[in-house]
Amino acid sequence: MSTSDQYIYQSGFGNHFSSEALPGALPVGQNTPQVCPYGLYAEQLSGTAFTVARSSNQRTWFYRIRPSVMHRPFEPYNKESHMVGTFDTRTTEPTPTQIRWLPFDIPNTEHVDFIDGLHTIGGAGDAALKSGLAVHIYAATASMNKRAFSSSDGDFLIVPQQGRLDITTEFGSLIVAPNEIAVIQRGMRFSVALPDGPSRGYMLEIFENHFELPDLGPIGANGLANPRDFKTPTAKYEHTNDEWHIVNKYQGELFVAAQDHSPYDVVAWHGNYAPYKYDLANFAVINSVSFDHVDPSIFTVLTCKSAHPGTAVADFVIFPPRFEVQQHTFRPPYFHRNCMSEFMGLIRGEYEAKQGGFLPGGASLHSMMTPHGPDSQTVERATKRDLLPGRVADNTQSFMFESMFQLRLTKWAIENQQRDHDYYKAWQSIPVTFNPNQI
């Protein structure tokens, strides 16, 4: 798989960007002149309410060949959809048991694109109420052809596991490879091409607020995901008169509208509401250098804050390659019952706490207050090893979607043939070493 990226990006997180594909396409000194340069139309995309505090206000001005309103009416999508937007007793089921899935199947047909390859695993809340989140996977074999996708429900955080994604947006294009992520926010239209053929990955959708960098507190000004390493596309445009279909996710259901031109006719844009990508290899890891563990929140890349301080609608957390040097310490991730829900995926390699069974392209869910931790083999090794300084997770990348919400699972996820019904056995042979006569 190639890692080349032919596109040009702007650097930074949350910046007010400006980009133009033709010189002078951006109006000077105002947003909506009577006549825009090159005969373009001004159109605003608002990511927050007009009256949100200035520090949190997000919007972008497009200068495009045609306003995006030039389409025919939306109609229900005529293909079967496996996406869910309301997580209630009609659509989903709860379970507190530990669940693991082997790698999700990639379709054996040549004509499944990114939209048709999306399946909801589970979630919480209601997209119509802008409350909660959804966890999806995608497994696709074909590039999107004259189709664009957007969500009125929330922001997508996309985690490729197999195959690069060549993503065209109204802002420009991004190449997103495994071990990179992309965030495409509410209302942004995009198309996905598959330069490496059949592809698979994970997607987190948040129905409220937006992702931001976590506060660093006593860490200081630097560390974790640094703002300069995020990349936002630069303007490019298409001027066509061919038939396109706009597929919109609205309250968990799909609708489609036809139009006679490309949706990617934005010649210039400026604003702070834009898609971006990030290479997980740039994460500056912080860890304990004496004894015990720093809690896994120290590996947070992005967070979507809730109304409760210190508590997240969703955190995106990674477990990257790093040194481990703790002394007198059980070094694998500790046994845990959490007031948060933990959905984990594996991009490549072997996860340090479960070597075998948890495979790239698979996933696990440890629900709120459900016990979890390292498996029997990991415990055996960890209690007997010499605690020398060393490396952990080299050539590996696992991640976690963590949420304050209790997740409900779709029937597709519960009944999926890749579900590992023997997962509970991973802990059954942990030895009892208690001896009341020996400290």
Image (tube, rainbow, N blue to C red):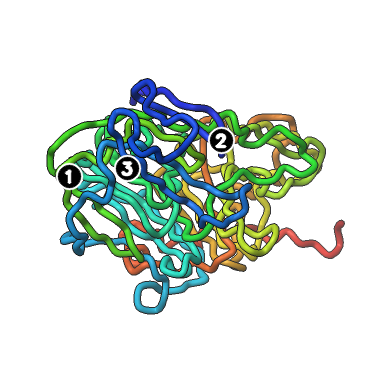
State the residue position of label 1. 244
Q: Position of residue 333 (x, y in %)?
A: 65, 49
How many residues crowd mark 1 within 10 Å: few (<14), some (14–19), many (20+)?
Answer: some
Give the image location of residue 301, x and y in percent: 59, 42
Foreground pick, 172 / 327: 172
Q: Amino acid at mark 3?
A: Phe
Task: Give, as a three-letter code, the residue at label 2.
Answer: Asn
Question: Is residue 366 found left or right of 9 in the rendered image?
Answer: right
Horizontal arrangement in the rendering, residue 106 relative to residue 435 (left or right): left
**Callout 1 amino acid:** Trp
Q: Is residue 433 left or right of residue 290?
A: left
Tell me which residue sits at (80%, 39%) in the image. Answer: 327
Q: Which mark is residue 190?
A: 3
Which residue is pictured at 60% across the width and 47% down the height?
A: 378
Mark 1 element type: strand
Q: Position of residue 383 (x, y in %)?
A: 71, 46
For the C terminus, the quadrant is: bottom right
Q: Secondary structure at mark 3?
A: strand
Q: Quadrant of the N terminus?
A: top left
| Residue tagged 2 | 15
